Image (cartoon, rainbow, N blue to C red):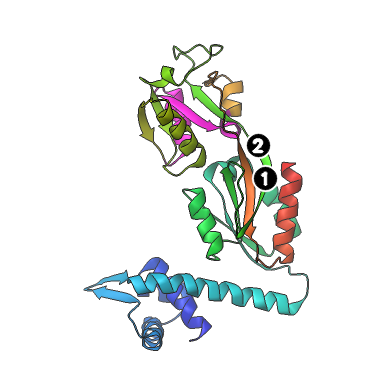
Amino acid sequence: MELKQLITFITAAEHVNFTLTAKMLNYAQSSVTSQIKSLEEEIGTPLFERLGKRLILTEAGKTFKSYAEKIIALTEEAKMAANQVRETTGTLKIGATESQCTYRLPPIIKEFKQAFPQVKLIFKPYISNEQAKEQLLQGQLDITFILDVNRTEDALHVESLIQDEIKMVATNDHPFPADSPVTLKDLQNETLLLTEDGCSYRTLFEDTLQDAGVYPNKLEFVSIEAIKQCVMAGLGIGLLPEMTVKDDIAEGRMKELNWQNECPVFTQLAWHKDKWMSAPLKAFIDLTRKTFK
């Protein structure tokens, strides 16, 4: 089992297309087919199922992919550790939500790239904190930003950076007065504009509603910017991190409702406790701490 075979397999598994894989890795297609076939023979089970012109990753292939990713990640770490020098190249894979990438990370990225211009940064979005944590455990991410309540994790180092206020916002002409408290019962006949299922603060809020026996209408979006536009269009009430709506409230594009959030959430930085700290990774963590605090 060769490293190049694993790289070819992972690329093919992500794109389920041997022709595209060959093009991306600068191989002949026959070479890709040969490498995959050799890998399947060595493992003793098909990694792909070929249905006519369609290519499908088998269950065995899905399982093997997670191990292949770990092998490649460990190989890269072993090379860097063996060098025992201050690394100025490489790749950092970072998990982050849309709001963090848009409102929090640009100054960190700018300063980091000035210090490590040869280090490639890859930001990977995720739907839920559990998904992000699983990717850390599987070695698919080096580090991730999460928005959650404070809690301990056995295999992960989780560091709270800053408390995030969650704001309830509505169009300026919404009948709820901005200075009057909004109760959960007030929301019964409202339409809530929410992020995808699995979002930490959405889950906490929905649990609170359920405990109170309140079941409003809901619209779900994959984009925070889409929620903001729909709030301003009067389509419903939004529940969003303060960093995403602060300027809109200040400039009068929407209004903040007087809602008391009893479950504070924090922007946190997480990585595997056994993660080897390369110089770029350590520098990124230190820079993040300095920027947030």
Report which residue position mark 1 lands on: 160
Residue 256, position as x, y percentages in the image? 55, 20
Disc 1 packing (10 Å; few <14; some 14–19; many ≥20)? some
Q: Is residue 140 left or right of residue 221?
A: right
- Looking at the image, do the residues carrying marks 1 and 2 touch, with CB atoms under 8 Å apart? yes
Q: Is residue 189 above or below residue 161?
A: above
Report which residue position mark 2 lands on: 163
State the image quarter where residue 156 is shown: bottom right
Image quadrant holding the C terminus, namely: top right
Question: Is residue 227 on the magenta stretch?
Answer: yes
Q: Residue at x 49, y 30 (%)?
A: 239
Q: Residue at x 48, y 79 (%)?
A: 6
Q: Is residue 17 above or below residue 46?
A: above
Residue 196, position as x, y percentages in the image? 42, 41
Name the residue at the front extreme. 211
Amino acid marked by disc 2: Gln
Disc 2 packing (10 Å; few <14; some 14–19; many ≥20)? some
Question: Is residue 202 on the magenta stretch?
Answer: no
Which segment did they paint magenta? Answer: 222-245
Of helix, strand and loop, which one carries label 1?
strand
Amino acid marked by disc 1: Ser
